[in-house]
Image (spheres, rainbow, N blue to C red):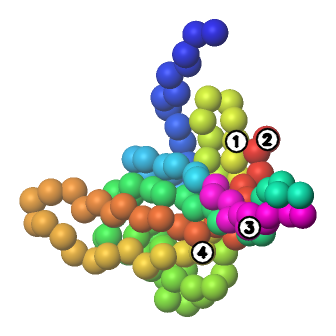
Amino acid sequence: MATVVNTGQTLTLTINAIARSEQITSARIEVAPSRNRYKLIGNTETQVVVDTVATLACDILLDWSSGTSDFADALWTAYTTAPNTPIAAVLATNGQTFSTSIYPECPPAGGPSNDLHTWSVTFQCTGVPTKS
């Protein structure tokens, strides 16, 4: 079977009912199970998944502006007003869509005066994303 190169991923974060995707230059969901290993009578072994942690890693262009409608301000506000309230996130790549909720993180303010302001962040998901 030929290898398919995936390009053209889009990520949409919905904050306060506003969907945003233009500022996200990279997005990756990772799911990591935590397993306990048991040695049973008869010297056989088994593993049991006891917990699963999913994360959404993003590279984001920070668009701080003088208004309150920019993406950086929306993330800042989501974190500073309700850090324990998840926000919706959807990752679409080559016909596959992954939906989840993430806990907000607070973006940095400032940066170089003559370059793009970027932010690499890893959001914690509320559970394992669903694929549709």
Numbered tag placed on residue 1 in the rendering: none
Of discs 2 and 3, which sits in the foreground?
3
**Distance between the alpha carbons at the discs numbered 1 and 4:** 19 Å
Mark nearer the N terminus (2 vs 3): 3
Q: Amino acid at mark 2?
A: Ser
Mark nearer the N terminus (2 vs 4): 4
Mark nearer the N terminus (1 vs 4): 1
Taking depth in this image into account, of 47 and 118 the one nearest to the observer is 47
Q: Which residues are magenta?
A: 31-41
Residue picked out by circle 3:
36
**Distance between the alpha carbons at the discs numbered 3 and 4:** 27 Å
Q: Amino acid at mark 4?
A: Tyr
Of discs 3 and 4, which sits in the foreground?
3
Answer yes or no: is residue 97 visible. yes
Answer yes or no: is residue 89 visible. no
Residue 74 against residue 130 in the figure, above or below:
below
In the image, residue 43 lies in the stretch drawn in magenta: no
Left or right for 24, reference 78: left
Taking depth in this image into account, of 104 and 128 the one nearest to the observer is 128
Left or right for 63, reference 57: left
Which secondary structure lies at badge 1?
strand
* Contact check, label 2 and label 4, Cβ < 8 Å: no
Which secondary structure lies at badge 2?
loop
Mark nearer the N terminus (3 vs 1): 3
Residue picked out by circle 2:
132
* Contact check, label 1 and label 4, Cβ < 8 Å: no
Q: Could you tell me residue 86's position as x and y percent? A: 66, 75
Q: What crowding class fits label 2: few (fewer than 14 Cα within 10 Å), some (14-19), or many (20 or more)?
A: few
Q: Residue at x 47, y 65 (%)?
A: 122
Q: Could you tell me residue 7's position as x and y percent? A: 48, 29
Residue picked out by circle 1:
97
Q: Main secondary structure of the magenta part?
A: strand
